[in-house]
Image: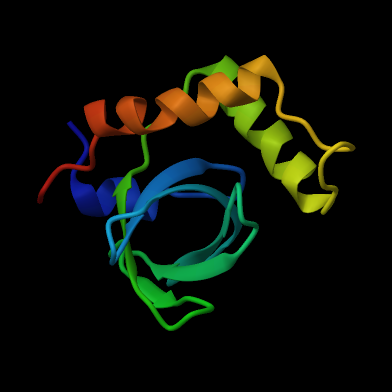
Amino acid sequence: MQSRSQALRAVKVGDVIFGIAEGGQPKLLLVYEADESGFWVRHVTSQTTARFGRDGQSRWTPDGGSGTIVSTAALPPRMREVAIGLDRKMGTGKEYPDFVLSEAEIELLRTYKNFFNLHPLPSE
């Protein structure tokens, strides 16, 4: 079994991971930049960015808050594909009626928390 530090060191560009903001809000995150000291993520639905250290703790957030990475488990391929597509869609900045969630995107938003909660990072 992989340790917490091993899992966080393995995070790379293109990974879809899960974090929790200090207020308890779940965050579906796409890693778009990574180096030895940490990684930059984009919140899939809001498109806000944050920097995390390899310990899984936020180093920078746009609002000065904090967050923690709680799972780096690989999503099943179909869920990952939908998450990447949703990130691209949200990045367009379009609004209703030009922007409507697909059934697959709705299903992802309803289920990703359960998936990641079933696959948490080890505590040590």
Which percent across, then down, holds residue 53? 38, 70
The residue closer to the viewer here, 112 or 30, is: 112
As drawn, the residue found furthest toward the bottom would be 64
Against 87, residue 47 (above or below) is below
Give whichever of 38, 108 is nearer the camera: 108
Q: Extreme right residue here?
A: 98
Is residue 36 placed above or below 102 in the rendered structure?
A: below
Above or below, 35 against 99 in this view is below
Residue 114 in picture, x, y percent from top left: 31, 26
The front one of 6 and 30 is: 30
Residue at the image position 49 percent from the left and 71 percent from the top = 51
Residue 93 placement, left or right of 65: right
Left or right: 115, with 40 as reference point: left
Image color mode: rainbow
- Residue located 59% across and 16% down the image: 78
Q: Can you tell which quarter of the image residue 69 is in? A: bottom left
Q: How many marks?
A: 0
Q: Residue furthest front?
A: 97
Pick the front one: 82 or 52: 82
Residue 80 visible within the image:
yes
In-image side of 80 versus 8 (left or right) = right
Please report the residue visible at 52 percent of the width from the left and 49 percent of the height from the top: 12
**Quadrant assignment for the N terminus:** top left
Q: Is residue 68 above or below residue 59?
A: above
Q: Is residue 36 visible?
A: no
State the residue lying farthest toward the left: 124
